[in-house]
Each structure stands twice: as C-alpha cells, then as structure tokens.
C-alpha cells in the first residue's frame, strides 16, 4: 500500500485523537488525557531527539506519574528511532494492545440500503455521544468526562451518530467519524452486547461513510484490535483492507 497515504493516515489519526493535555519532550509527544482511549494517553515517539533513552524514559515517567497515568509508548512503523521497539524489548517492556489500521482507499458517495422501520439514525453532540458510548462500554464517569472534553476540543470536526430502537428508545449502536480534508477516520463504533449479530455495526458504518463522503471524504481509515476477528470481517465487507499495525509498550511490572 502507498506509504505516503499511510503516513497521512497516521498524522490524521494523531490529529483526530489529540487531547488538550499534551506536551513535547525531545521529539516525543506526551499525551496525558485521563480517558479510556490509549492513543490519547501515551507517548508517540515522532523524532529521535538528543537525550539518551534512559533520561527520556525517566522524564516521561515523571510526567505520567504526575498525571496519575501509567506510562505507555505507542510503537508504529513511523516511530523514531526505528529501533525503539527493540530497545524497549531489551529493557523487558511488554507488548500491549496490538492494533491494525485498516484503509478504504476509494470512498464512494452512494446511499446505503434503507434501515429497518424500527430503527432510526440520530446525530449526537459531543457530551451526549461520550456519555452514550461510555454507558454502552460501562466506562466510569471520569473516562466519559475525559472523552467528552477531548471531542469538544478536537482540532478535527467530530460527527457522532447512534442507531436507536424506535419502540424502546434504546441505543443499539453508536459511532463517529472525524474528517480531515479528504481523509475520514471512523471511531468509537460499538454495538450493545444484546444487539450483536444483527448487522447493526455494518449498517451504522455504511451511514457514517455515506455522510462523510457527501461532505468531501474520499478515503477512510479505522483502528481495530488485532484479535477482533468479527469486527475485521465487517470492515472487510465494507471494502477496508489491512494498512499497518501498531502496539504499545509498558514497563515491566
């Protein structure tokens, strides 16, 4: 796959997940949000810097400790220096949360199939969306508040939607997209556990992609846990293919 496109996707993913609580440390972008999303509470090593690794780890560890967060370093194919993953492995840092980035290289502006009559698609503002997806995930109030804060202050416009049962008013699925120019990222796609197996995630994603394409989106990406085979099959049926992987490293113990 085109490395230039993957690099743009990596940048877009960083922009779409940017919290207000972040700072630079010698080429490392420290993200210190107290929310659930690890991509908003980790180190992204974007440049080699000048300090020895031990010094940077100590300074980063101090910043995360002061924020009340565990120290995590996100490793991608764009991480600098390129051997950072090996250096951390030699220090016995363990791998956490392997993730695949999937790409839809040609987003088509076409209407999706109609929804069943008992379902409705509804947009939600940031606060309501964060509370809704947090409730579905059973996230604590502090993580829901951090999610809402990040969405409200995101440098990339947010558009969140839910699929609701017209008869019970229950939210059955939710998801959002962040569009940066022609590039669209899907985030927070989640289906109520009791409503899975009904094709709701696919129906919702079809609508997210259709809306974003009507606004100018031409390519799309998403991030999915490497062991979530069911979700990957849904995204593959939508036309997404594997782009690249990333994972986190955490200190031993």
Image (tube, helix red, strand yellow):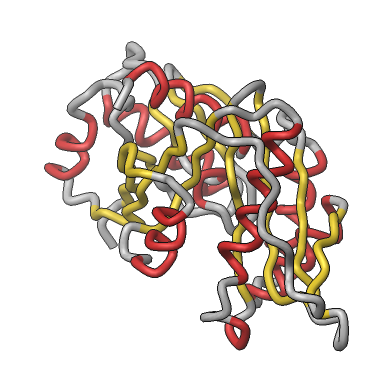
Q: From this viewpoint, which residue is outermost toward the top?
A: 50
Left or right placement of residue 139 versus residue 157 in this view: left
Q: Position of residue 3 (x, y in %)?
A: 32, 20
Give the quadrant of the N terminus. top left
Residue 108, by quadrant, is top right
Q: Where is residue 179 in the image (x, y as percent from the top left)?
A: 67, 32
Residue lying at 87% horizontally and 80% vertically, measured from the top left: 166
Left or right placement of residue 174 versus residue 79 in this view: right
Looking at the picture, does residue 96 appear above or below residue 197? above
Q: Position of residue 193 (x, y in %)?
A: 58, 83
Give the quadrant of the C terminus. bottom left
Q: Toward the viewer: 219 or 185?
A: 219
Residue lying at 71% horizontally and 76% vertically, measured from the top left: 172
Q: Where is residue 188 in the image (x, y as percent from the top left)?
A: 62, 56
Left or right placement of residue 62 versus residue 181 in this view: left
Q: Toward the viewer: 22 or 227?
A: 227
Q: Toward the viewer: 224 or 182?
A: 182
Looking at the picture, does residue 143 appear above or below residue 250? below
Residue 212, by quadrant, is top right
Residue lying at 62% horizontally and 83% vertically, measured from the top left: 195
Residue lying at 43% horizontally and 56% vertically, measured from the top left: 237
Left or right placement of residue 163 versus residue 232 in this view: right
Looking at the picture, does residue 188 appear above or below residue 118? above
């Amino acid at each position: 796959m085109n490395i230039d496109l993957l690099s743009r996707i990596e940048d877009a993913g960083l922009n779409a997940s940017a919290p207000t609580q972040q700072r630079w440390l010698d080429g490392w972008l420290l993200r210190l949000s107290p929310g659930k999303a690890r991509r908003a509470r980790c180190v992204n090593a974007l440049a080699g810097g000048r300090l020895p690794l031990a010094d940077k780890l100590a300074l980063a560890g101090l910043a995360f400790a002061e924020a009340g967060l565990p120290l995590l370093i996100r490793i991608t194919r764009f991480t600098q220096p390129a051997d950072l993953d090996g250096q951390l492995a030699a220090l016995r840092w363990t791998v956490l949360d392997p993730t695949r980035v999937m790409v839809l290289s040609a987003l088509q502006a076409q209407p999706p199939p109609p929804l069943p009559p008992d379902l409705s698609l509804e947009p939600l503002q940031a606060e309501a969306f964060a509370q809704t997806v947090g409730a579905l995930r059973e996230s604590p109030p502090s993580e829901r508040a951090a999610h809402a804060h990040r969405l409200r202050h995101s440098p990339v416009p947010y558009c969140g939607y839910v699929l609701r049962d017209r008869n019970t008013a229950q939210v059955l699925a939710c998801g959002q997209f962040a569009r940066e120019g022609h590039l669209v990222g899907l985030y927070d796609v989640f289906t109520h556990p009791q409503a899975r197996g009904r094709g709701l995630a696919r129906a919702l994603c079809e609508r997210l992609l259709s809306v974003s394409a009507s606004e100018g989106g031409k390519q799309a990406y998403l991030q999915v846990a490497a062991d979530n085979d069911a979700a990957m099959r849904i995204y593959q049926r939508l036309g997404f293919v594997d782009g690249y992987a990333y994972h986190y490293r955490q200190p031993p113990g």
